[in-house]
Image (cartoon, rainbow, N blue to C red):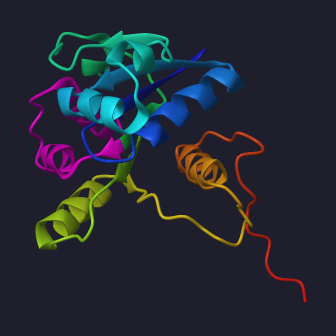
Amino acid sequence: MKRLIIGMTGATGAIYGKRLLEVLRQAGGWQTHLVVSDAGALNIQHELGMKRSEICSLADKVHGIDDIAASIASGGFRTEGMIIAPCSMKTLAAIAHGFGDNLISRAADVVLKERRRLVIVPRETPLHLVHIRNMGIVTEMGGIMYPPLPAFYGDAKTLPQLIDETVGRVLSVAGIEVEGLYTPWEGINP
């Protein structure tokens, strides 16, 4: 079974992290390791009406935000990588500058140093220069920035379809293919 770390922070967009956990569970073959920040739990409650325990029940393993001794805090614990969805600008800044002050930023640091795939779903608008520079720094270190901007050519008709389109694409750039979440671009045939 392959392992994937999912981080959820206090930025808006908790539905992306929730849907990632649901899709990976349905796909099978994946062991999810979830870390939710305190602000992330607050946001999950506000946006989804879910308690921390409810979102945690969607993961295979749950690690406390301050558990720096957790398995995922070490490069010796093999994972396929990490997705942070949603990712706050605070967490992005910590990752960009190697400030492993909690388990989300430490696990991301480990993923980068081990040359594994890190996909960040940043949620902030508008962006100021420091946000953009931090995205650039993490990209230069090998991370992938995936702002959750919908593509409309897939003909999504509902909000859940737009969410699945983003989740499918995030998983794809993480190297995980799950059929049926979105329609890949195949060009326009007049």
Vertical side of 137 occupied by 37: above or below = above
Q: Is residue 98 magenta?
A: yes
Q: Looking at the image, which residue is at 60% across and 53% down?
A: 159
Instruction: Identify the magenta region.
Output: 86-115
**Residue 143 in the image: x percent, y percent?**
35, 51
Q: Quadrant of the N terminus?
A: top right
**Residue 8 in the image: x percent, y percent?**
33, 34
Residue 134 in view (yes/no) = yes
Q: Quadrant of the C terminus?
A: bottom right
Vertical side of 52 occupied by 187: above or below = below
Vertical side of 34 occupied by 62: above or below = above
Q: Looking at the image, which residue is at 57% across and 50% down?
A: 163
Q: Looking at the image, which residue is at 18% across and 10% down?
A: 69
The majority secondary structure of the magenta stretch comes to helix
Q: Nearer the viewer, residue 52 or 134?
A: 52
Which image quadrant for residue 128? bottom left
**Residue 31 in the image: x percent, y percent?**
53, 16
Which image quadrant for residue 117? top left
Indicate left or right for 188 with 31 as reference.
right
Q: Nearer the viewer, residue 83 or 157?
A: 157
